[in-house]
Image: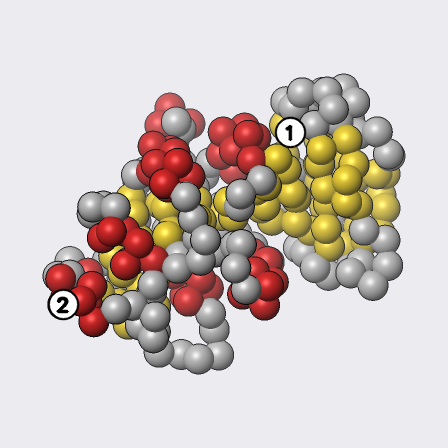
Amino acid sequence: MSGRDSRFSAGVTLLGGGKSCGQDIEESLTLAPNLIGVDGGADRALELGLSMKLVSGDFDSISKATRAALDPDIMIETPDQNRTDFDKALDLADAPVILCVGFTGKRMDHQLACYSVLVRQAKRPAILIGDEDICFHLSHDVTLDLAKGTRLSLFPMAQVVATATGLRWPVEALEFAPWGQIGTSNEVTNGPVRLSAESDGLLVILPRDCLHDVVRVLWQGDPAHCP
C-alpha cells in the first residue's frame, strides 16, 4: 500500500517531531485513528508503540533505526525543500478531519510555517494542537456552542473581512490584516458563536479543551461517523 491515492474514511492524526505529550496523542487517535508519522514524528510513534498508516517527509530528522524498523511500503519520501514536511503530509491526509500533534512548542519559525500552511491548505479540515491552545483556518462559516467566558482569538494571515457574533468585542464586517487590525483575546459572551470570513486567511485560536467542539464543526465526512 503506497497510500498516495487513498481516502481515509475516518480522521487522520499527523504526528510531527515537535513537542507532544502522550495525552494529546492518545486523545487525537481516539478522534482521528489513522496515524501518519511526519518525519521525526515517526520516531515518537515507534517509541510509544503506535502503528502508522504512512510515514511522510524529507526524512532528514527520522532516525536510521526507525527507518530500518518500518515497512518500506508505508514510507513516502518527499524531498522538495520548498515546502515543509507538514505541508506535504497534508497532501496525503485526505480525511474528514486532520488533527496535528507535534508541530508546536519548539522552534518559533517552524510554528509560524505551520500557521502559513493552514492557509495554504485552506480546504483541509486541519487542527493544530498545542499545549494550551488549538488553531484552525476559517475556511467556511462555523457555529460553535462555547461556554461564556471562553477565550477566542482571530488572527489574520492575510487581509480579510470577517464577521463574528456572540463575542464581547464586536466583529461586524471588520477588515483584519497582519499589519493592522487583529482580534486576539476576544471572549464569548453568549452562544452560539458564529464566525464567517469573506476570503481565506483567518485563523481561529481557542483553548485546548474546545477540541471536540471544533472537530464537530470542521468534520467533512458522514456526520453519523463524527466522534
Q: Earlier in the sequence, mark 2 or mark 1?
A: 2
Residue at image location 81% in from the left, 51% down from the top:
182
In-front residue for pair 161/73: 73
Residue type at mark 2 is Ala
Percent of width and height locating residue 164? 77, 35
Query: Residue 150 occupies which quadrant of the picture?
Result: top right
Q: Secondary structure at mark 2?
A: helix
State the mark number for residue 10. none
Percent of width and height locating residue 98? 43, 46
Residue at image location 64% in from the left, 29% down from the top:
143
Q: Secondary structure at mark 1?
A: strand
Above-or-below relation of 166 to 76:
above
User: Could you tell me how many numbered marks the image carries?
Assistant: 2
Pointer 1: residues within 10 angstroms few (<14), some, or many (20+)? some
Is residue 52 in view?
A: no
Query: Residue 54 occupies which quadrant of the picture?
Result: bottom left
Percent of width and height locating residue 11? 36, 40
Q: Nearer the viewer, mark 2 or mark 1?
A: 2
Q: CA distance from mark 2 to mark 1?
A: 46 Å
Above-or-below relation of 90 to 203:
below
Above-or-below relation of 198 to 163:
below
Residue at image location 73% in from the left, 61% down from the top:
158
Above-or-below relation of 143 to 64:
above
Residue type at mark 1 is Thr
The residue wearing badge 2 is 68
Quarter of the image containing the C terminus? top left
The residue wearing badge 1 is 143
In-front residue for pair 191/6: 191
Query: Residue 225 occupies which quadrant of the picture?
Result: top left
Q: Is residue 153 left or right of residue 59?
A: right
